[in-house]
Image: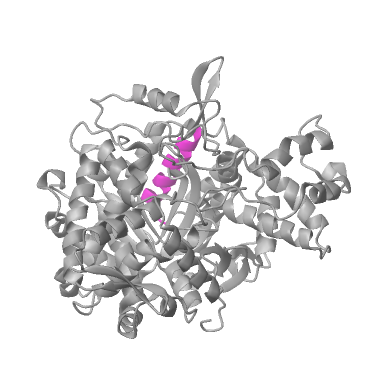
Amino acid sequence: MDDGFCYKGERFADLQMLRYRLNGFEQLTINQKLLVYYLSEATLWGRDITFDQMGIYNIRIRKLMEVVYSFVSQDNSCEADQLRTYMKRIWFSNGIYHHYGGEKFTPGFSEDFLRDKIMKIDESSLPLLPRQSVEEMMAELFPVIFNPNILSKRVNKADGEDLVVTSSCHFYQGVTQNEAESYYKAMKDPSDKCPPSYGLNSLLTKEDGELKEIVWKYDGMYGQAIRHIVYWLEKAAEVAENEAQRECIRLLVNYYKTGDLRDFDRYSIHWVNTNDGDIDFINGFIEVYGDPLGLKATWEGIVEYKDLEATKRTRKISDNAQWFEDHSPVDSRFKKRVVKGVTANVVCAAMLGGEEYPSTAIGINLPNADWIRAEYGSKSVTIGNLTDAYNKAAHGNGFKEEFVVDNTTLQLIEKYGDLCDDLHTDLHECLGHGSGQLLPGTDPDALKAYGNTIEEARADLFGLYYIADPKLVELGLLPDNEAYKSQYYTYLMNGLMTQLTRIKPGDQIEEAHMRNRALIARWTYDHSEGALALIHKDGKTYLVVNDYEKLRTLFATLLAEVQRIKSEGDFDAARQMVETYGVKVDPVLHEEVLRRYAALDLAPYKGFLNPRLSLVYSAKGEIEDVEVDYSETYEEQMLRYSKDYASL
């Protein structure tokens, strides 16, 4: 709680809903508020795209389950309650697969229960295909819902398997991993210094035995949704804060209409250099974590406005970007001679959508294309009102007291933890992702399925190395040379132990960010020579740090190697490092961590409810304000989105 604002919303399954507050929104001008509103509408209209990308049956199953969900609203049976939970998990994950682990949900209700309810519902309310009977619909969808062996994993990253064939995400149809990799490799021209991100915005399929891309664009696949997005982007352009911002929106609209990836690059270059004004946004096919090959992007959207006071912190970092690059412990061949266009802001999120909703990032650095970063720079944000919501909701929940080794370390974390968490995010996004360079001739996709993990490790290590540097005290970003220790402890504790709360017994680590943290923590532990130890006290395992200075040396060594792997495109080394340190789980430690965490009665995953924005009209019918409402429940918001923003 804070000034009467309740950050916690509904809790179900392994999920806790949170609310974020639009601090300072009332101080924006009416045109700025309208810009936020129009961009927010463009953000919400992408929802169905994300659902479809994460599984070809997701939208059909969501629509079916929403009808049944409403039908059983007064049913207090155990199976009805399980169905309600299943529905809420689908909403949260944009489909039938866990948003983090990617495994298909197991329904807690039976086929007979669902069949019985469906047969009692008016046929006109059901999402039937043309000329499809209710029985045919159930025969089509029930195996996907109930059979654990059919379309079982959204993104499979298991070494040695065909990652495309065994993944259920809707980026490929009837295509093997080898066919997809060969198809896009053939497109690349080694002499092209400005290559587009081939495959980023298309479905790869086969027609008459020939591979073919179906592009996601205004008059192509997902066109029904994209046309709504374009409408609201064009409304936003009418109230843009300046001409550069208006041109940025125009270029994005043009890309949506053509589907041409070189148009996307033109937009990205203009976007990274558009920094005047307080409002900014991300809208489109951006991140490739949802594709097992790391090529195709899931749709996402976020609308944000600057936190001017907090941005002073990130500006100090970005203003010194060249110093950080020059003093990096990596080989000089991999350093940028001139760091260009590093822009960093702390922002308030105003609306989340697509892959960024309800579970979202707390920091973003874009564009992703390495050649654009090298030539034009990058833009980074730390989303301050989201980290603030996380911190306030977690206050006093007992987690740190359970897993931190002693009171001295706990007091260190209480004193410096929030500050260092924010600063590490700043360093990761602002400098880490923007640092370093590929050697000439290195294919940006050379690391294939391991690329995302290596890139996240590179950015995290950059932040870990520099958060202990006296330069941060000199810049006034940290109060003293002891503060960094809180970040070292909590990061390594998470990578070695506590992030295992997100893994089911018997599973390995699949998600790229989790693999990255495990890789760093386990590699450091294995090379620590006593600087780190896992001890047993009162029947519990704890992390002990015996030499913080040695840890910084180890982070420097690992950063140098990870940067080499990235710069040279050393696939074999990437594979060896990730598979050795980032994937496997110690089953004994895992069981203990799960047991201790369960005793705290906490949800391991968090996600956010959006505020509801509404136009306020004067007596003359003119728009005079934008109202912010935080009272909408999770069910109300999700059902409203399914009704008001349905396009596919």
Q: Main secondary structure of the magenta part?
A: helix
Front-lying residue, 150 or 639? 150
Pinpoint residue 349: horizontal percent, then vertical percent.
47, 63
- Report x, y in % for residue 510: 44, 49
The image shows residue 358 at horizontal and vertical percentages of: 55, 58
Q: Quadrant of residue 242?
A: bottom left
Residue 252 colored magenta?
yes
Asked whether 309 or 33 is in front, the reply is: 309
Residue 273 seen anywhere in this rendered image of the structure: no
Q: Quadrant of the C terminus?
A: top right
Image mark count: 0
Q: For this view, does 439 lie left or right of residue 59?
A: left
User: Is residue 208 placed above or below 430 in the rendered structure?
Assistant: above
Residue 193 falls within the magenta-colored stretch:
no
- Quick check: 332 above or below 466? above
Is 407 rendered above or below residue 280?
Answer: below
Above or below, comparing residue 566 to residue 34 in the picture? above
Q: Is residue 552 left or right of residue 7?
A: left
Q: Which residues are magenta?
A: 241-257
Which color scheme does this rendered protein use? one colour
Q: Is residue 202 visible?
A: yes
Outermost residue, top direction? 208
- Nearer the observer, 430 or 519: 519
Residue 338 coordinates in the image, percent (x, y) = 14, 48
Q: Is 459 situated left or right of 307 in this image?
A: left
Residue in the foreground of this view, choosing between 200 and 338: 200
